[in-house]
Amino acid sequence: MLVFRYIALHYLKYFVVILFAFILFSVGFDYMGVATKLPDSANLVVMYIVYKVFYSIDMLLPLTLIFAMIATKVSFIRNNTLVAFYSLGYSKVDILKPFVVVSMAIIVLFVALHSTSFARADEFAKNI
């Protein structure tokens, strides 16, 4: 159970960092492309950016889940943590179980978010 929590926390850390980087990259380039077309109102600009962040999360979530798993595994290999887990008797299934459980929890959360106005964020951004 302790190994499950250790791997899950590292996976969540990489997930948050990679998702934040992807969102900044995506929204930053989108904003640079439409900055002159947006109205001068700061309120509308902030609303546009927030809606684009929601849309970016929606589009980049699967990619982020995969990259976070790869980054976590690479980090464990570089720090010899993966070798230590295997030498302590944990199987490959025990090592992969936190990735699957955390990924499924995140996916269920985002499926639940799609029952709200989160799913129409791109429409709201285009209306501005």
Image (spheres, grey):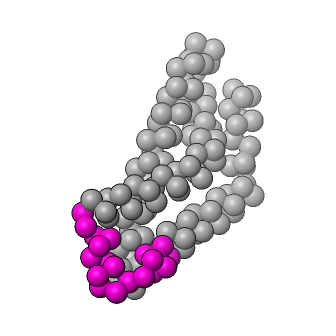
Q: Indicate yes or no whether the magenta region holds residue 63.
A: no
Query: In the image, residue 7 lies at what x, y percent?
Result: 38, 71
Residue 94 located within the stretch drawn in magenta: yes
Q: Is residue 98 above or below residue 53?
A: below
Q: In the figure, residue 33 lies in which quadrant? A: top right
Q: Which residue is found at the position 38% from the left and 60% from the top?
A: 72
> In the rendered view of the protein, which quadrant contains the N terminus?
bottom left
In this rendered view, identify the residue nearer to me: 1 or 126.
Answer: 1
21 with respect to 126 (left or right)? left
Q: Which residues fall within the magenta stretch?
A: 79-97
Identified at 53% across, 32% down, the residue is 27
Residue at 63 percent of width and 47 percent of height: 58
Q: Is 47 displayed left or right of 12 in the figure?
A: right
Q: Residue 84: horizontal and vertical position, in percent?
A: 27, 76
Q: Extreme top residue here?
A: 36
- Whether residue 15 can be seen here: no
User: Looking at the image, how many numbered discs can be counted on the residues?
Assistant: 0
The relative height of residue 116 versus residue 30 in the rendered view (above or below) is below
Left or right: where 99 falls relative to 82: right
Q: Is residue 119 above or below residue 40?
A: below
Q: Main secondary structure of the magenta part?
A: helix
Residue at position x 68%, y 32% from top? 125
Q: Position of residue 68 (x, y in %)?
A: 45, 55
Quadrant in which residue 95 is drawn? bottom left
In this rendering, does residue 107 appear at all? yes
Counting from the top left corner in percent of width and height, residue 45 is at 57, 27
Q: Nearer the viewer, residue 89 or 8?
A: 89
Q: Residue furthest left?
A: 79
- Taking the image as shown, residue 100 lies to the left or right of residue 10, namely right
The quadrant of the picture occupied by the C terminus is top right
